[in-house]
Amino acid sequence: MTKEIGEFVRTRRKAGNLTQRELGELAGVGTRFVSELERGKESLRLDVVNRVLAVFGKCLGIADAPKQDEA
């Protein structure tokens, strides 16, 4: 899921002609955080991830997990 979020952020950032620094300023986070988010780093704080997603009108939420096949 972290890779999907990172890809979403990178795609939207580039579509908006924003640098990582500009996105960080809009979201109130550092450039390093934006870089780590886009690379899919797994140990990021969700509240800070939501600040970045809010720039694009999105936030993380509860979703049903895909069912795993039983062996």
Image (cartoon, helix red, strand yellow):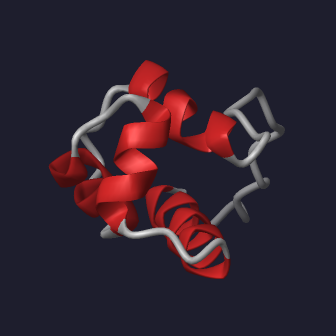
Q: Position of residue 34 (x, y in %)?
A: 32, 53
Give me the residue at 39% from left, 55% from top: 22
Q: Going by the image, does 60 lie left or right of 2? A: right
Q: Going by the image, does 2 lie left or right of 64? A: left
Extreme residue toward the left, this view: 32
For residue 40, say whether it is visible: no
Q: Position of residue 69 (x, y in %)?
A: 73, 65
Q: Quadrant of the C terminus?
A: bottom right
Q: Nearer the viewer, residue 44 or 15?
A: 15
Q: Nearer the viewer, residue 47 or 4?
A: 47
Q: Going by the image, does 60 lie left or right of 64? A: left
Q: Quadrant of the N terminus?
A: bottom right
Q: Nearer the viewer, residue 32 or 68?
A: 32
Q: Nearer the viewer, residue 39 or 31?
A: 31
Q: Position of residue 3 (x, y in %)?
A: 46, 67
Quadrant of residue 39 within the rendered picture: bottom left
Give me the residue at 46% from left, 19% from top: 47
Q: Position of residue 5 (x, y in %)?
A: 55, 58
Figure check: 62 above or below 10: above
For residue 7, say whether it is visible: yes
Give me the residue at 76% from left, 27% from top: 62
Figure check: 32 above or below 62: below
Give me the residue at 64% from left, 41% from top: 55
Quadrant of residue 58 within the rendered picture: top right
